[in-house]
Image (cartoon, helix red, strand yellow):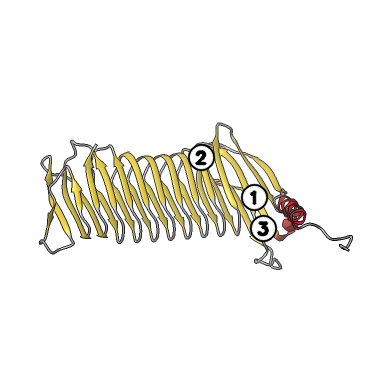
């Protein structure tokens, strides 16, 4: 006789899935940790320094700085949160209390901030992603373990992450973007770009400014519309693909140690019939600022737009 408590395997799996689903739902619930609005004026700055948290900052037409912080209800009392008005704007600090166990799971925070669009930003988080949208001021961002994503930025910008991707859509101003372990994507830039990744691909598209892009292990892609003021593309192991206007004036220097060069702007040459390397150098349209493209192990494709 089957025991009265026996449950068919299929039914058991359905019940287990439902229980895990409910458990996951509860684990994703959040409560309000902090909320405050500050009356301010344009042209100042918002500074945030957090031990943990995903930071989302949006510029608006309002003269208010609005801060809303949500997190897991189980850990609401594990943080010190202070926000204050300082001489040059608003400052937010979030720190762990001494007794908190840093190994707790789901110990996450979401920090949503609205600032005047003309504000500058200085954001730091030791663990989390950072997003910024519609900012018309200088931007300085550091994350020790997260992604950085930006949209519609007007102002000089410096971004650093120790372990994440960087993605930017529409930026006017000089850009420095560095990641120790991620991809870099910059679309619609106007201004000088300097970027480096130790383990990822770099994809750039823009209309003006000098470019210095280096990766230690990935591909590089450049679609450039502007007047050449200096371009350097370098990867230790990967392919490089670049397109520039047909009217570009430049001193070209292309080289690959193991790979081939394809270009409709200059004729490449191999060192010998037995060599795996190839190079191309010379002036196009009378010469101008240097365009240097180098890879140790990969192909180079340089074309006119």
Residue corresponding to mark 2 = 133
Residue 205 relative to residue 2: left or right: left
Contact? badges 1 and 3 (CB < 8 Å): no
Nearer to me, 227 or 82: 227
Placement of 184 over or under 118, stated as above or below: below
Q: Residue 288 in the image: x percent, y percent?
A: 15, 44
Whether residue 119 can be seen here: no
Residue 249 relative to residue 135: left or right: left
Q: Quadrant of the N terminus?
A: bottom right
SS type, badge 3: loop
Residue 97 relative to residue 166: left or right: right
Q: Residue 278 in the image: x percent, y percent?
A: 16, 57
Nearer to me, 153 or 4: 4
Nearer to me, 208 or 220: 220
Q: Residue 64 in the image: x percent, y percent?
A: 61, 37
The Cα atoms of the two marked residues, 1 and 3, are separated by: 24 Å
Q: Which mark is residue 83?
A: 1
Q: Which mark is residue 106?
A: 3
Whether residue 7 can be seen here: yes
SS type, badge 1: strand
SS type, badge 2: strand
Number of numbered discs on residues: 3
Few, some or many residues within 10 Å of mark 3 (<14, 14–19, 20+): few
Contact? badges 2 and 3 (CB < 8 Å): no
The Cα atoms of the two marked residues, 1 and 2, are separated by: 21 Å
């Amino acid at each position: 006789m089957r025991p009265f408590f026996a449950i068919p395997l299929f039914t058991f799996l359905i019940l287990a899935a439902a229980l895990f689903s409910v458990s996951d739902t509860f684990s994703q619930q959040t409560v309000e940790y902090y909320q405050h609005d500050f009356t301010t004026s344009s042209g100042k700055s918002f500074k945030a320094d957090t031990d943990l948290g995903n930071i989302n900052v949006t510029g608006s037409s309002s003269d208010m700085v609005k801060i809303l912080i949500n997190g897991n209800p189980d850990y609401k009392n594990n943080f010190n949160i202070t926000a204050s008005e300082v001489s040059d704007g608003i400052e937010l600090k979030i720190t762990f209390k001494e007794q908190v166990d840093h190994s707790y799971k789901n110990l996450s925070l979401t920090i949503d901030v609205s600032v005047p669009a003309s504000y500058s930003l200085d954001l730091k988080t030791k663990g989390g992603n950072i997003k910024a949208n519609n900012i018309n001021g200088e931007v300085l961002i550091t994350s020790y373990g997260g992604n950085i994503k930006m949209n519609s930025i007007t102002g000089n910008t410096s971004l650093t992450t120790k372990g994440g991707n960087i993605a930017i859509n529409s930026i006017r101003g000089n850009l420095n973007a560095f990641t120790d372990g991620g991809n870099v994507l910059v679309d619609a830039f106007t201004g000088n770009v300097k970027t480096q990744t130790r383990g990822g691909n770099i994809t750039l598209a823009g209309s003006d400014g000098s470019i210095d892009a280096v990766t230690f292990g990935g591909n590089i892609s450049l679609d450039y519309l502007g007047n050449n003021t200096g371009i350097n593309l370098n990867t230790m192991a990967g392919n490089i693909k670049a397109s520039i206007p047909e009217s570009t004036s430049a001193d070209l220097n292309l080289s690959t140690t193991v790979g081939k060069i394809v270009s409709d702007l200059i004729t490449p040459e191999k060192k010998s019939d037995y060599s795996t390397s190839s190079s191309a150098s010379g002036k196009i349209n009378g010469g101008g600022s240097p365009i240097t493209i180098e890879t140790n192990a990969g192909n180079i494709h340089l074309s006119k737009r």
